[in-house]
């Protein structure tokens, strides 16, 4: 039985080089871990523009904000593994 994938929602916009970088990181990670990527272009949506324009790219994992702007490969892997339930949240490590 396979694990259900983590749903990675990436809020992005055309011309955003950080968005392209994060998309490449997610594509690479999806080759190793169960990850379903949804890319949402905020252009033309006033609500999304107001919410995310200053923070792009914004990444949600299973509906929870996981990153904005930049994230290292190691931190991204860690957050996806936590979303999969493979690791305990840092605040429960004691």
Image (cartoon, rainbow, N blue to C red):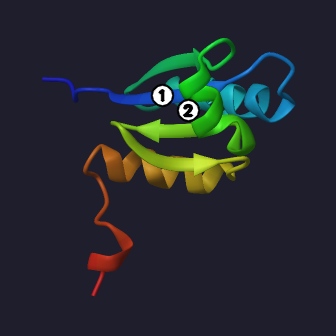
Give residue 11's position: percent from left, percent from top.
Answer: 59, 28
- The secondary element bearing badge 2 is classed as helix
Give whichever of discs 2 and 1 has the lower sequence position. Answer: 1
Given residues 64 and 83, the one toward you in this image is 64
Is residue 67 rendered to the left or right of residue 72?
A: left
Q: Quadrant of the C terminus?
A: bottom left
Q: What is the number of callouts on the image?
A: 2
Task: Decide: is 86 above or below 91.
Answer: above
Q: For residue 33, which numbered disc appears in the image? A: none
Q: For residue 9, which numbered disc appears in the image? A: 1
Task: Decide: is 93 above or below 68.
Answer: below
Give residue 22's position: percent from left, percent from top.
Answer: 69, 34
Give residue 57's position: percent from left, percent from top.
Answer: 68, 36
- The secondary element bearing badge 1 is classed as strand
Q: Which residue does the image show at 83% across and 27% down from the upper left?
A: 16
Q: Residue furthest bottom?
A: 94
Mark in the foreground, 2 or 1: 1
State the CA–CA distance, disc 2 to disc 1. 14 Å
Q: Which residue does the image show at 58% across and 49% down from the upper left?
A: 67
Q: Quadrant of the N terminus?
A: top left
Q: For residue 29, which numbered disc appears in the image? A: 2
Q: Which residue does the image show at 67% across and 25% down from the upper left?
A: 12
Q: Which residue does the image show at 25% across and 50% down from the upper left?
A: 85
Is residue 35 rendered to the left or right of residue 49?
A: left
Given residues 23 and 34, the one toward you in this image is 23
Give residue 32's position: percent from left, percent from top.
Answer: 48, 30
């Amino acid at each position: 039985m396979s694990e259900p994938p983590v749903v990675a929602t990436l809020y992005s916009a055309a011309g955003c080089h950080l968005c392209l970088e994060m998309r490449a990181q997610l594509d690479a990670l999806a080759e190793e871990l169960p990850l379903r990527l949804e890319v949402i272009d905020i252009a033309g949506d006033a609500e999304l523009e107001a919410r995310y324009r200053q923070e792009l790219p914004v990444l949600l994992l299973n509906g929870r904000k996981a990153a904005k702007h930049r994230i290292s490969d190691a931190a991204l892997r860690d957050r996806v593994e936590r979303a999969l339930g493979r690791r305990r949240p840092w605040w429960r490590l004691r």
